[in-house]
């Protein structure tokens, strides 16, 4: 337990500001990009497409992280991170103001303002994410790096649960406009405190050269050429396309059709994070000896069960309140285990000296296509009524596609090659659990090292 308190761990003490940053940062992004934003869009009478678009912006803009690395030789890691993380906080003033103005009536222009504001927030976030993990990994000494990222993961998880509890309580005791105002004020405060922690950290040596020429020349070979990487890349792309829309549209259905309160949905989201922790706790001591493939199968199987149960709930709605807690726990376990297994498996199939470009492409392809999925499904799920609603037939088709896709992924997993012998260090020890966007950013370090070679 000492590792949870950096001042009690002498080896982690010099890097404590990075761990405090992880805690305060989670207070920000959990509200700004998670389930609360889905509920806020529903409160503004946004349709399924508009909600899916806002939820997908952080994923759709992930490739910006790669492009932003060209600024590293000029700005360095600390200045680039501070620029991106500092700018994003200002855009949260938009939903804060909209929450207040909504007391005088919800207007159509408010939805447009949210779409634009979250685009700018996600763009700034991606710029900062291009440098932050590389910066922190360069600061932390190698002998405590694993423990550092594990502690980073735990502090992020604790903050995430705390933020979700705050949301649930505010929904339960306050009118909607004031609940959202409190949440976004809390999110902005978290962003400000996280930025103060970053200011106290020293910078590391910036790269002297950052070229995109290799990316342009080798990308087609990695995407379409023979080898072990290509089939896994497209399997992972399929996984994100199939599963990414499940979270936002589940919350949207429960709010607009199922009659669940915002506090109920926040409670389910807390259970989802409990599932993430439980799933990764289960696999942590087993994955090095058993390999990643068994956990891929478990993850895909859980999503198949989730889709099948949702189909049952759509036909027998009386079961929905009783089944949802179990489904959200499985949702967290399935997504969390895939993310961990994915990071471990990539380290096995790509040699270290050749890892930079294919792993960066993997992150860009999976998150970008995963971000497109809610947008496309949002168009098909959009109801005909003026108020927030869903096309229930299309929603049922959505889960049929999810079920079939998950079963196909289980079968395709058998074709993956994996060598289990020996220990393989994951590409990123802990940041993937609660901040998947950091995975892509961490790969930039590999790209920078490869360019200097």
Image: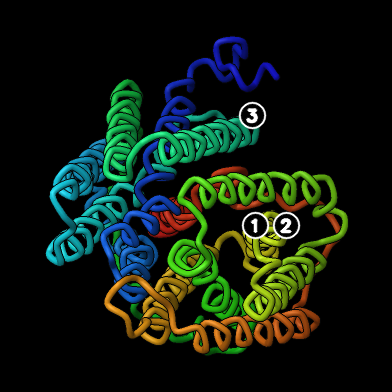
Residue at 26%, 60% in the rendered image: 44
Disc assigned to residue 14? none
Residue nearest the viewer, comparing 64 with 327: 327
Looking at the image, residue 229 lies above or below residue 165:
below
Q: Is residue 124 left or right of residue 145?
A: left
> Which callout, 3 or 2, points to the residue nearer the camera?
2
Question: Do callouts 2 and 1 mark residues in contact (Cβ within 8 Å)?
Answer: yes
On the rendered image, what quadrant is the C terminus found in?
bottom left
Q: CA distance from mark 3 to mark 2?
A: 39 Å
Q: Secondary structure at mark 1?
A: helix
Q: Which residue is mark 3?
A: 143
Q: Quadrant of residue 57?
A: bottom left
Q: CA distance from mark 1 to mark 3?
A: 37 Å
Res. 358 visible in picture = no
Outermost residue to the front: 318
Q: Which residue is mark 2?
A: 326
Pointer 2 local density, CA inside 10 Å: few below 14, some 14–19, many at least 20 = some
Residue nearest the viewer, comparing 148 with 239: 239
Disc assigned to residue 328? 1
Residue at 62%, 28% in the rendered image: 144
N-terminal of the two: label 1 or label 3? 3
Q: Quadrant of residue 305?
A: bottom right
Q: Secondary structure at mark 3?
A: helix
- The percent coordinates of residue 308 (x first, y second) are 72, 78
- The percent coordinates of residue 375 (x first, y second) are 37, 77
Looking at the image, residue 135 lies above or below residue 271:
above
- The percent coordinates of residue 5 (x first, y second) are 59, 17
> Which callout, 1 or 3, points to the residue nearer the camera?
1
Q: Secondary structure at mark 2?
A: helix
């Amino acid at each position: 337990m000492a590792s949870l308190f950096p001042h009690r761990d002498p080896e982690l003490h010099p890097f404590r500001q990075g761990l405090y940053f992880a805690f305060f940062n989670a207070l920000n992004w959990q509200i700004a990009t998670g389930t609360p934003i889905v509920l806020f869009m529903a409160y503004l009478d946004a349709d399924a497409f508009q909600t899916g678009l806002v939820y997908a912006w952080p994923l759709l803009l992930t490739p910006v992280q790669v492009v932003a690395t060209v600024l590293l030789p000029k700005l360095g890691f600390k200045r680039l991170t501070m620029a991106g993380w500092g700018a994003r906080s200002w855009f949260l003033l938009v939903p804060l103001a909209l929450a207040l103005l909504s007391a005088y009536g919800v207007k159509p222009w408010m939805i447009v303002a949210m779409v634009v504001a979250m685009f700018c927030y996600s763009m700034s976030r991606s710029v900062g994410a291009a440098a932050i993990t590389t910066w922190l990994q360069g600061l932390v000494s190698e002998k405590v790096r694993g423990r550092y990222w594990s502690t980073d993961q735990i502090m992020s998880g604790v903050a995430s649960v705390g933020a979700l509890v705050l949301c649930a309580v505010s929904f339960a005791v306050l009118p909607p406009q004031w609940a959202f105002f409190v949440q976004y004020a809390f999110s902005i405060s978290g962003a400000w405190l996280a930025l103060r922690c970053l200011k106290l950290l020293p910078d590391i040596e910036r790269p002297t050269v950052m070229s995109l020429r290799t990316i342009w020349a080798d990308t087609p070979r990695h995407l379409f050429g023979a080898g072990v990487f290509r089939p896994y890349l497209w399997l992972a792309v399929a996984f994100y396309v199939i599963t990414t829309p499940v979270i936002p549209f589940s919350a949207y259905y429960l709010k607009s059709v199922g009659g669940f309160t915002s506090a109920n949905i926040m409670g389910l989201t807390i259970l989802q994070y409990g599932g993430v922790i439980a799933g990764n706790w289960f696999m942590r001591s087993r994955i090095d000896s058993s390999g990643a493939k068994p956990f891929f199968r478990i993850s895909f199987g859980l999503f198949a069960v989730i889709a099948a149960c949702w189909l049952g709930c759509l036909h027998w709605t009386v079961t929905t309140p009783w089944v949802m807690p179990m489904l959200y726990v499985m949702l967290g376990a399935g997504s969390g285990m895939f993310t961990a297994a994915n990071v471990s498996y990539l380290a096995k199939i790509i040699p270290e000296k050749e890892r930079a470009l294919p792993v960066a492409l993997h992150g860009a392809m999976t998150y970008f296509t995963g971000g497109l999925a809610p947008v496309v499904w949002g168009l098909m799920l959009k109801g005909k009524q003026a108020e927030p609603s869903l096309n229930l037939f299309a929603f049922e088709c959505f889960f049929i596609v999810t079920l079939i896709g998950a079963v196909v992924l289980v079968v395709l997993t058998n074709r993956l090659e994996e060598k289990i012998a020996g220990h393989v260090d994951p590409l990123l020890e802990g940041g993937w659990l609660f901040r998947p966007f950091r995975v892509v950013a961490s790969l930039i370090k590999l790209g920078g090292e490869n360019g200097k070679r």
